[in-house]
Image: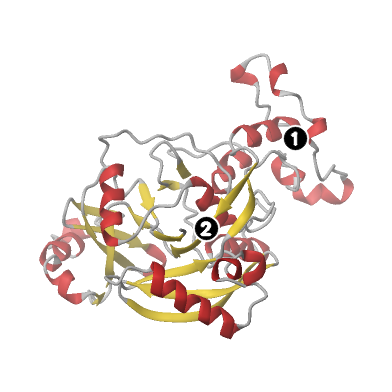
């Protein structure tokens, strides 16, 4: 097989490790710009909900990327409504009474009310019924379609817009780990924000800020679970300026089709981790959350906070969502985490991309 046939998803899965390594060497030689520094290459296994992929994780200019195989006929989008989801979660039944209750577990398109029969736009989503929930899902997800997806090197973690990751500051010790030389130029200002001189009275009420932004200098995000800050350099960009800056570095943003395939691996599920939506405070809930927040079947980590959009090539198309207030119904709360969710959020031409609101993910496409 030729190289482009070998990196097709259906064929890639059958290659030996030696054959995969040979493919990778050719891809690095012909598609990674010489100015990009490759510092680590590792063959790793990823798995989520039964979909497995053995692929490469590598460092490009000090940032983690994964290799995602090509798919010439990827099926994307969604038109199956609530099919496959758990009705008792969607309809908020008492879990303790489930043994005495029988539910219809799926809903077909034939059972749904056609869109042209909806009378009032403001009342067309009855989220107390499976039919209404299905209508809501279909209207807020991208249309069913077939797309050709090139092989890609895709950044494992999305970054706040306009930033580059520098390292981590420990809030207990004040120690920094990362690119020390770049951090030094910001150290005095950062310490002033994180370790201010306080009076005894002020110290009783002072808390670490969630984020700190000094435009065109640095950006900080507090990671409460780890008691540390992620430290980034920062540059203000419009969407067009960010794309131009990435292009100069040898990178690009994903298209909507490419994002959906990279996140869902082409699986025909509304959510990449499965059908569970209700996260209870028990072992089962913790396991579901681990699936949601961990690496997907291609090794990517997708933000689940629902407080930022992730950019695509098109400023009129953003993935994920920024929920300013808590939604009432479970499907409203969770749908933005769907692989196929359509936010309808548009970025204005001269709008500066706030790192608190937008994420971006670098990629290199393997295409002729």
Sequence-first tag of 2 and 1:
1
Side of 88 where 293 appears, left or right:
left
Give the farthest residue toward the top: 119
Q: Picture coordinates of residue 221 (x, y %)?
A: 31, 59
Tell me if residue 175 comes above or below residue 331 in the rendering.
below
Q: Identify the residue under disc 1.
A: 130
Q: Helix, strand or loop at disc 1?
A: helix
Q: Identify the residue under disc 2.
A: 150
Q: Picture coordinates of residue 161 (x, y %)?
A: 31, 51
Give the farthest residue toward the front: 2
Asked whether the residues under the numbered discs 2 and 1 touch, taking CB atoms below 8 Å apart as contact, a structural biologist would say no
* Residue at image point 63% right, 52% down: 74
Q: Nearer the viewer, residue 102 or 57?
A: 57
* Residue at image point 50% right, 54% down: 304
Q: Nearer the viewer, residue 368 or 299?
A: 368
Tell me if residue 173 comes above or below residue 202 in the rendering.
below
Colour scheme of this structure image?
secondary structure
Q: Residues within 10 Å of mark 1 (few under 14, many from 20)?
A: many
Q: Nearer the viewer, residue 342 or 170?
A: 342
């Amino acid at each position: 097989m030729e190289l482009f046939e070998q990196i097709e998803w259906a064929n890639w899965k059958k290659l030996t490790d030696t054959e995969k390594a040979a493919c990778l060497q050719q891809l690095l030689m012909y598609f990674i710009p010489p100015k990009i520094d490759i510092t680590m290459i590792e063959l790793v296994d990823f798995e989520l909900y039964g979909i497995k992929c053995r692929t490469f994780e590598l460092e490009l200019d000090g940032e983690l990327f994964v290799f995602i195989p090509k798919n010439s006929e990827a099926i994307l989008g969604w038109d199956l409504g609530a099919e496959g989801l758990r009705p008792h979660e969607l309809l908020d039944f008492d879990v303790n009474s489930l043994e005495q209750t029988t539910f219809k577990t799926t809903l077909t398109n034939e059972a749904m009310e056609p869109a042209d029969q909806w009378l009032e736009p403001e009342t067309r989503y009855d989220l107390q019924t499976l039919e209404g929930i299905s209508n809501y899902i279909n209207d807020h997800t991208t249309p069913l379609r077939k797309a050709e997806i090139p092989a890609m090197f895709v950044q494992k973690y999305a970054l706040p817009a306009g930033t580059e990751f520098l390292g981590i500051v420990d809030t207990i010790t004040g120690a920094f780990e990362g690119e020390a030389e770049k951090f030094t130029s910001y150290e005095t200002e950062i310490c002033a924000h994180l370790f201010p001189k306080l009076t005894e009275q002020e110290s009783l009420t002072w808390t670490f800020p969630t984020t700190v932004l000094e435009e065109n200098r640095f950006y900080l995000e507090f990671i409460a679970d780890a008691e540390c800050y992620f430290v980034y350099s920062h540059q203000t960009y419009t969407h067009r300026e960010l794309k131009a800056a990435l292009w100069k570095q040898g990178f690009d943003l994903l298209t909507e089709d490419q994002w959906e395939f990279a996140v869902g691996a082409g699986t025909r599920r509304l959510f990449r981790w499965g059908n569970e939506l209700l996260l209870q405070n028990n072992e089962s809930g913790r396991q579901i959350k681990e699936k949601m927040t961990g690496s997907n079947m291609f090794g990517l980590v997708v933000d689940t906070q629902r407080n930022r959009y992730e950019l695509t090539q098109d400023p009129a198309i953003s993935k994920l969502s920024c929920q300013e207030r808590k939604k009432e119904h479970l499907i409203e709360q969770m749908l933005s985490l769907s692989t196929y969710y359509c936010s309808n959020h548009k970025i204005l031409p001269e709008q500066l991309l706030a790192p608190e609101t937008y994420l971006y993910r670098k990629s290199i496409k393997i295409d002729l």
